[in-house]
Amino acid sequence: MIKIDAHQHYWKLDRGDYGWLTPQAGPVLYRDYAPEDLAPALAQAGVARTIVVQAAATHEETAYMLQLSDANDSIAGVVGWLDFHDPNWRGVLESFRSHPKFVGIRIMIQDMSDPYESHHPNSLEALRYLAEIKLPVDILINSKQLPATIELLRQVPGLHAVIDHIGKPAIREGVFEPWAGQMSEIAATYPGIYCKLSGMLTEAAHDDWQPEQFTAYVRHIVEAFGTDRILFGSDWPVCLLAGSYQDVCDVLEAALPPTLTEREREALYGGNAAAFYGVELA
């Protein structure tokens, strides 16, 4: 089995475009993270390649990640960011698409003061174009933003997208609904929407989580989306706030339905990411 981690980040603080990364973020996150920092954990977990996802809302950071990918074979693809309000967004997008490892963009609804900002006419125009060309789109939300996300999908029904971090349910509080019903609605209504089994440890108490807390959430996503629309992702290095890379892998393994076949496991751990992002497994 060739494993792909479908969601991780690299950043370099002195680039200056990570507004959310301040000393107040704490020593775990407030430092540089590069491919050589992740390499030992990938080797231990048997993960061959990764999808690097944007962590700054700038075109410059996307260009930086693409430069990293040129020098690192472990990077299978780069998910960047696009300013939909830039009059030249199509030109910027075409420049990104000329790079062989550019595989998609991420919209960060989570960071919007009003999630319905994602319905701005400029955003809808851009997203409808992305749907037309079938460019993968990552959607970053928290569970309270699911109603706005469902409405967005109604307006762009052909979007080829993946919901990051299982929609960030309130795992710490053990809240299951309405998250579960809303995720089921998305899965049933929009066959082009996938879901990442990622970012879960940090939704629990960082220093006091138990593996069994995640089981119901993981199994609900597997049941709702099916085994061909789920992707393994670590959310490294953000995951380090709550556990190691291996902890992420172990928690997911413990939470998965025991009935998964070898083919279904291969899909979850690599095949689905390769298909969704259009990258090579090897």
Image: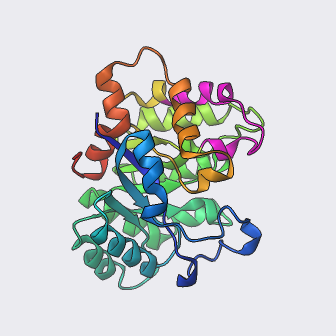
Closer-to-camera residue (42/238): 42
Q: Is residue 70 magenta?
A: no
Q: Residue at x 38, y 40 (%)?
A: 46
Q: Residue at x 33, y 80 (%)?
A: 92
From the viewer's perspective, tell me whether residue 233 is left or right of residue 179. Answer: left
Give the vertical position of 159 relative to 249 (above or below): below
Closer-to-camera residue (38/111): 38
Furthest toward the top, the residue is: 259
**Residue 96 spot, x, y in % from top left:** 29, 74
Q: Which residues are magenta?
A: 200-221
**Residue 262 spot, x, y in % from top left:** 31, 21
Closer-to-camera residue (175/99): 99
Q: Residue at x 28, y 24 (%)?
A: 263
Give the vertical position of 200 relative to 260 (above or below): below
Q: Residue at x 55, y 25 (%)?
A: 255
**Residue 254 spot, x, y in % from top left:** 55, 24
For residue 168, what is the image quadrant? top right
Q: Inspect this view and state whether residue 153 appears.
A: no
Quarter of the figure with the N terminus: top left
From the viewer's perspective, tell me whether residue 204 is left or right of residue 261. Answer: right
Q: Is residue 202 magenta?
A: yes
Instruction: Report the label total.
Output: 0
Q: Inspect this view and state whether residue 128 appears.
A: yes
By secondary structure, the bulk of the magenta-drawn segment is best described as: helix
